[in-house]
Amino acid sequence: MSPSTRSKLRFARHRWPLAAGIAAALLAAACGSATGSGKAGGSGTASGTSVTAWIVTTGPSPVNTKINKAVSDFETHHPGDHITVDYIENQSYKQKIQLAMGAGNPPTIFWTWGGGPLKQYIDAGDVQSLGQPSYATSFLPSSLGAVTFDSKLYGVPIEGTQPVYFFYNKSVFSKAGLSGFPSTWSGLLADVHTLKAKGYTPISLAEGDQWPGLMYLEYLTDRIGGPAAFDAIEQGKAGAWSSPAVIQALTDIQQLARAGAFQSGYDSLKYSGGGSDALVYSGKAAIQLMGDWDISSVLGLNKSFVTSGDLGLAPFPAVAGGKGNPSDLAGNTASYVSVASHATAKQKAVAEAFFADELATTGYAKASVSAGEVPVIKGAASMFTGQQLASYDQTIYSSVQSAPSFQYSWDQALSPSEATTMLTNLAQVFELSQTPQKFASVMNGAQAGGS
Amino acid sequence: MTAAGHIRPARRQGAGPAARKRNAPAQRGLALADLIGLAPAVVLFGIFILLPLLGAVVLSFFRWNGLGSPHWAGGANWAQFVHDPIAGQSLAVTAKVVALSWVVQTPISLALGLFTAGRARYRSVYATLYVLPLLLSTAGIALMWEALLDPNFGGVTALSRSLHLGFLRQNWLGDAHLTLFVIVAIISWQFIPFHTLLYQMGRRQIPAVLYEAATLDGATGRQLFWRVTLPQLRYTIATSSTLMVVGALTYFDIIYIMTNGGPGYTTRVLSLDMYQAAFLQNEFGYASVLAVVLGVVGVGIALALVRFTGFGSMRSQQEGAT
Amino acid sequence: MSGVATAGGTAAAGRAAPVPAGRRSHPAGRPGRRHRLPMGRVTAFAAATVWLVVVLAPLYYMVLASLRSQGSYLTANPWLPAGGLSFANYGTVFTAGLGRYLLNSVIVTAGCLVVTLLFSLAAAFRVVRNSTRGAAGSFRLLLIGLAIPIQAIIVPLYLLIYRAHLYDTLAALILAMSAAAVPVSVLIMTSFLRDIPQELIGAVLVDGGSEWTVFRRLIWPLARPVLATLAIYDGLNVWNNFILPLVLTQSSSVSVLPLGLTKFQGQYAINVPAVMAAVLLSVLPLVVLFVLMRRQVMRSLGAIAVR
């Protein structure tokens, strides 16, 4: 062998013990972490019960703190019982809970948005029915619709209500010579033309995420045809997607797009990066249709814009000749937690005690208000005074209280399969690459195709 | 030792009588060595990759939404696949992504690899910097490019204004005609560094004697490239192309984060289709069909590439070098 | 890909030829230029610099964005470091638990590298050494693994891991990701090992060595360049892998870096500048690994002498 190869081999010989040692250490570390990690589902102990909860988080936030406090309050009053909360982020959560349910390994308490996906779990026997408990009466009735099936309650609100409103930049409006937010659809169209003429982007739309566009369809359908139009779709009636209300709503959407109401690149802009908010608070755009979480969002991005009251809030306009009540709302009625039927009887008891003793109380509602939410407890109107966003919260709460109908977001109300198809095709309607009629026929087919 | 010393394939096959006699008692030793050497890799791969894959094949004949038990569906999922226009569209988009990726990445990686193989000191600085995109996580790359390409606020738009280059102001990720190319460009940006490394290594391993000999015969720079460099890089090209093609087939991350298949279905590759079917529409049976199709196509291409370039025969690349 | 370029050859060129080895070994890559003219080199330099800008400009943008707040990273000038830069996001990233995620990522990556490189080298050695059906068959079997998309097997894999009581452990990640890395590693190693000349192997056997001796004394040390290359490639894939940790783990005590990034994702909004900061921080260990490995790779390539 060459001298250099020989010397290399000599060098290499000394490496063996080192490598083996490192490997052993790593293996130990890996297995060590394995035994350290908690088992999902919890276990019982002689003095009390342990329960796990999976909560969807919006990042380190006052909401998480509120939940943690409720948990420690509960544990103080129920000595021996423990609730371990895992905070999981939105996108990953859906996958995780799906897999966990399928493997029979879910947490005792799990987050849900109700509607279609929850119904799938219920049909598979994975969700514990809460019956008709007494604590349910503390909540606003409209908030429980998404988790009530066959008159039985399957979930309890844990986070506040999130209806959808029009948000607008008041300074831009006054600079463009507009007095207030229009209360009719035709008024909105006229304002769009005015804003465009003055060089503003009339409406900021983040259709890249697909669900922002859905809000337009939800409201227009309701204003034109009343809640009955979507009820038919939800019940799976044949041809329900071709109802005149839906077709008219889609046509109106395309009219808006053709009028150049949306900003350039609206079909790829995402809400998540803060881009659509930036358009509004920087004064480039005037209006955005968005859920009320936008208030806290914008507060975090550009505090003075909100605290100065420059962020306007207005209900969706009425449509002339439409059957729907202009006070109807659309959005997330609330966010909920449910109990997995895989849990033991003791674990279920702990979970329900937590619901009754914490989530359904005015104390929890007050904490929610401090965390910036609008809780769905009855009689919360007085809780908002003195809060930073009091005027917004009060408007939202009273509109929820008095809404004749509060339509749950369609992408939650429908089955996942139908919802995905709807979102993708609706995006094409917004891009003007699909006609309303084609959309209806695709959706009728998707519905019939079985989901 | 010169390059000529490498050529002795016949002896490896144990053809000569002397070789046979020497190997006979060592046969058992060879077999045992084979077992010990191959078993760990094969067993690990078999349990954690092959077994689940077989599971997916089986699952493709069932209907399952992830909850409860699967229901036998016979060939229904497969029939649905054949008749599904979206699946057909996804196949077409996937083919485009694969072809475009190869066409964009290979020449650039080759050129960069040859460049960084040079000995000048500044080239190794360049080489280290070139690697950076490869090291970033996909989420970071996706978010960064999304922000850069935003038609209203993005860095590219800002450049178009300050440099007065109007054509830079496009709806990069929303225009159905542009988005696919933009995605391929971003993926290429991320992975060209890796293939550059492969070509750099490949180039460094070409013995200088070959170039000397050819130059003495009067070859020009261009001829050196086509007659010496490229042929010697044959196996590198094969490796790089196989990895590139197969990688592009199953590529998912950036497209999922940035466009999610949009606008419409223009960037919806098959792996995205499969992910949506499984985790958004909860149709695990149908998703398994797509998974099997992807696997079969990928395996077919990988095996074909290996056979086509003579990769499979374990002959030394140095053969015929003199 | 041969790992045994001749130092003798290069040295000879350096001594004998009037043109330095460096130029000879780089035929410009651009057709139509005789390598004596500087034009080829200038074009090469220009083109390479253009690509350098293409690589660095977005990274510069990323650094800038990481120094801004959520509200201003879009509205502020994207290319100029003007207006309110701060390291606040980096602070946020650390308090969000980056240390633990970093440690987990290191454990998983190191574990995978040890398993993958060892198993793959052993297998590649046998594949190259022997043309038996077993070896060739194993090779083809592993090649199949190249084309299998991870999304395809994720659900069955999850069930398998769960039934094996390995759910929510780092061990599960190490095993699954090693298994996924084996095909590529074996592929690259076989193409590297095949150029080790038979004479060397013959020499060890003639000295009375067994297959094991060949491996320990010859293959293992000579494979350093390819081991280093694969350490970079496999290491990267494992470090940045998101979907396997997502599905196979749950607790934050077992979370790895890419999962940690998702902590900055709200239900609707993402704290983009914080994610940028987290990404840049998590790149640093990789840069260190790469710089170390690279010297290994390049030095070994230029210096190994083969007789």
Image: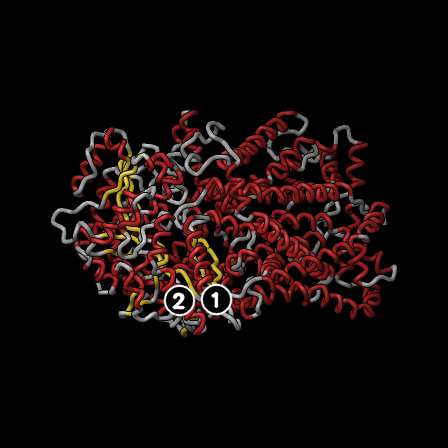
Of pointers 1 and 2, the one earlier in the residue sequence? 1
Residue A42's mark? none
Percent across and percent down for residue C231 are 66, 50
Q: Nearer the viewer, residue C280 or A13?
A: C280
Residue wearing tag 2: A353
Q: Nearer the viewer, residue A188 or A262?
A: A188
- Asked whether residue C91 is in view, the answer is yes
Q: Residue at x 78, y 44 (%)?
A: C304
- Asked whether residue C197 is in view, the answer is no
* Quarter of the image where one finds residue B290: bottom left
Asked if residue A235 is positioned above or below residue B252 in the image, the reply reads: below
Percent across and percent down for residue A326 are 17, 49
Asked if residue C25 is positioned above or below residue C163 in the image, the reply reads: above
Secondary structure of the residue carrying tag 1 is: loop
- Label 1–label 2 contact, CB within 8 A: yes
Asked if residue B255 is positioned above or below residue A70 in the image, the reply reads: above
Categorize mark 1 by other alpha carbons within 10 Å: few (<14), some (14-19), many (20+): some
Q: Amino acid at mark 2?
A: Ala
Q: Residue at x 64, y 48 (%)?
A: C232
Q: Nearer the viewer, residue B274 or C202?
A: B274
Percent across and percent down for residue B41 are 66, 63
State the separation of the CA atoms marked 1 and 2: 11 Å
Residue A81's mark? 1
Percent across and percent down for residue B300 are 53, 59
Q: Amino acid at mark 1?
A: Asp
Categorize mark 2 by other alpha carbons within 10 Å: few (<14), some (14-19), many (20+): some
